């Protein structure tokens, strides 16, 4: 169903529902309780032996009590054993399912990648046609989405996502834009999402094959597949005058009211800036100060503001999306890095990152850069799959299995992170209001609320560690930053 959370990662291949892992934890707790109770009964039973009771000629009730303790010890031991067996069975089933899913996915990715590389190796013309076609389709698709999802008039908080619209069939809407939105169930189909993930993962193999890289080396590319493919698409787009990166500059900054650090995933996500409500600000940085301690910082990063492939004034655009996927600093990355410098964050400052959509991908890139003292990371709907996030701090990656945006990042390689998945429209109708509904902010907001009441250890532990980051601060400030691209002549 649409309210079921699938939990994975945390250093293993185990994958299961929140309810399943909560049940396993209850079984472990029951086993611990039975072990303690068994030890207590053993101590009591050892105080007076049966032969001592008989030699002392005690009443029959005392002998009955001793026999009752013996029976209780047997029952307790059996309950403990069965609890541990059932817990192990659940863990084995979850690990087996996760391993099988990972193995099958890996085989599919390798097969499609090698097949594409083989075709490109024997027909480089195919590569050129593919790259040109991808660039044209991506550019046209971005423009169509932007046109189809132009903000409606009036306040509408869920419109923070550019992949949305509040009114179907608006006057003046083009036929392709209308069709794209009215048939969004195709985009929302998990099969489509899987195909997009496979294509993104295999794109680099196709490029490598066309460049003559031996097949033996192609399989070693790993996460470079998405990087190489995105770089090639950017080069192809640049020849058409699109997807060209530019420097960025600060346009405005202003303080915001804040009472303390976030409490829970829903509140954490709510602090990601909505550019329509923050006068265009794409980055919000909270500073936690405590006497005698180093200042700590929470960085919140907005999603894509425009899907235009032309680098105009907005740095949180399609060009930055592609640059982040290619692995180098796009306009959004440069904006956040500049905001952090203005906020006083250096390489030693403890910092946590939270981002939605493109902001999630940017947050992952910042955490993976090694340039900052990252203490935590939470991403919602970001294309983070091939961004290798370091270990050593709580990392939570939230993806909807019917959302194509995370799939653009390729196969998820961060098995040490807590991966939370949800099929938003399982068992319910796909709304016609949105072009890419499963990516819409309000549905990730629903998921965050479900995470706040989740019972699995992985989720509750990560939440506790992330929330504790800002605790104890005597002073908390929040500043919003807006950046613009510098026009290139």
Image (spheres, rainbow, N blue to C red):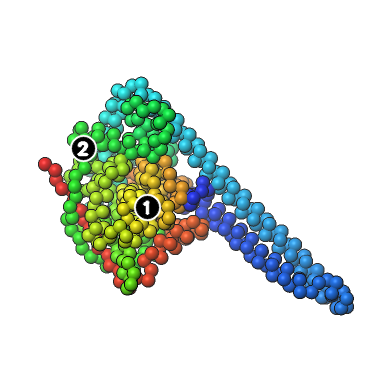
Residue 231 visible, this orientation: yes
Residue 193 or 128: which is nearer the viewer? 128
Q: Describe the element under mark 1 as helix, strand or loop.
A: strand
- Across and down, in percent, residue 300 comes to 31, 57
Residue 61's image quarter? bottom right
Q: Which dot marks residue 344?
A: none
Residue placed under numbered mark 1 in the picture? 379
Mark 2: few, some, or many residues within 10 Å (few <14, many ≥20)?
Answer: many
* Image quarter hosting the C terminus: top left
Residue 321 or 468: which is nearer the viewer? 468
Residue 458 or 55: which is nearer the viewer? 55
Q: Which residue is found at the position 49% from the left and 41% from the top? A: 102
As displayed, is residue 61 above or below residue 243?
below
Query: Marks 1 and 2, how far apart in space?
Result: 28 Å
Mark 1: few, some, or many residues within 10 Å (few <14, many ≥20)?
Answer: many
Whether residue 250 sits left or right of residue 426 in the image: it is left
Residue 66's image quarter? bottom right
- Across and down, in percent, residue 232 comes to 29, 34
- Across and down, in percent, residue 450 comes to 45, 57
Q: Which residue is found at the position 34% from the left and 61% from the top? A: 350
Q: Which dot marks residue 242?
A: 2
Residue 462's image quarter? bottom left
Q: Which residue is found at the position 37% from the left and 31% from the top? A: 205
Residue furthest left in the image: 489
């Amino acid at each position: 169903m649409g309210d079921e959370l699938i939990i994975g990662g945390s250093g293993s291949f185990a994958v299961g529902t929140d309810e399943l892992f909560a049940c396993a934890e209850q079984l472990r707790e029951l086993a611990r309780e039975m072990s303690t109770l068994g030890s207590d009964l053993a101590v009591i039973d050892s105080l007076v032996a049966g032969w001592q009771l008989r030699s002392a000629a005690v009443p029959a009730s005392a002998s009955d009590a001793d026999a009752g303790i013996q029976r209780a010890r047997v029952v307790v031991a059996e309950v403990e054993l069965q609890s541990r067996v059932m817990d192990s069975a659940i863990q084995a089933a979850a690990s087996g399912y996760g391993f099988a899913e990972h193995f099958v996915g890996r085989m599919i990715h390798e097969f499609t990648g090698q097949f594409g590389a083989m075709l490109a190796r024997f027909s480089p013309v195919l590569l050129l046609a593919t790259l040109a076609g991808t660039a044209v389709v991506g550019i046209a698709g971005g423009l169509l989405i932007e046109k189809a999802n132009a903000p409606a008039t009036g306040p509408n908080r869920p419109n923070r996502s550019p992949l949305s619209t509040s009114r179907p069939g608006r006057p003046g809407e083009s036929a392709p834009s209308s069709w794209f939105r009215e048939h969004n169930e195709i985009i929302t189909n998990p099969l489509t999402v899987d195909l997009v993930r496979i294509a993104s993962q295999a794109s680099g193999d196709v490029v490598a094959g066309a460049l003559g890289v031996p097949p033996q080396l192609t399989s070693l590319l790993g996460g470079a597949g998405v990087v190489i493919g995105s770089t090639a698409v950017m080069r192809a787009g640049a020849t058409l005058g699109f997807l060209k990166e530019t420097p960025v500059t600060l346009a405005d900054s202003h303080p915001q009211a804040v009472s303390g650090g976030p409490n829970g995933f829903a509140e954490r996500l709510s602090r990601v800036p909505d550019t329509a409500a923050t006068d265009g600000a794409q980055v919000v940085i909270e500073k936690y100060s405590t006497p005698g301690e180093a200042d700590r910082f929470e960085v919140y990063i907005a999603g894509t503001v425009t899907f235009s492939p032309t680098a105009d004034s907005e740095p949180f655009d399609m060009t930055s999306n592609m640059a982040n996927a290619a692995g180098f600093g796009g306009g959004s990355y440069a904006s956040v890095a500049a905001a952090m410098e203005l906020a006083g964050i250096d390489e030693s400052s403890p910092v946590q990152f939270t981002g939605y959509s493109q902001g999630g991908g940017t947050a992952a890139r910042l955490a993976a850069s090694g340039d900052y003292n990252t203490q935590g990371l939470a991403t919602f709907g970001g294309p983070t799959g091939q961004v290798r996030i370091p270990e050593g701090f709580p990392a939570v990656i939230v993806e909807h299995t019917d959302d194509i945006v995370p799939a653009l990042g390729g196969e998820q390689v961060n098995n040490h992170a807590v991966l939370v998945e949800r099929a938003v429209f399982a068992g319910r109708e796909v709304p016609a209001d949105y072009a890419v509904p499963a990516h819409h902010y309000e549905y990730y907001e629903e998921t965050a609320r479900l995470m706040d009441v989740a019972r699995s250890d992985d989720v509750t532990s990560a939440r506790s560690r992330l929330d504790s980051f800002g605790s104890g601060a005597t002073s908390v400030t929040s500043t919003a930053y807006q950046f613009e691209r510098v026009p290139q002549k």
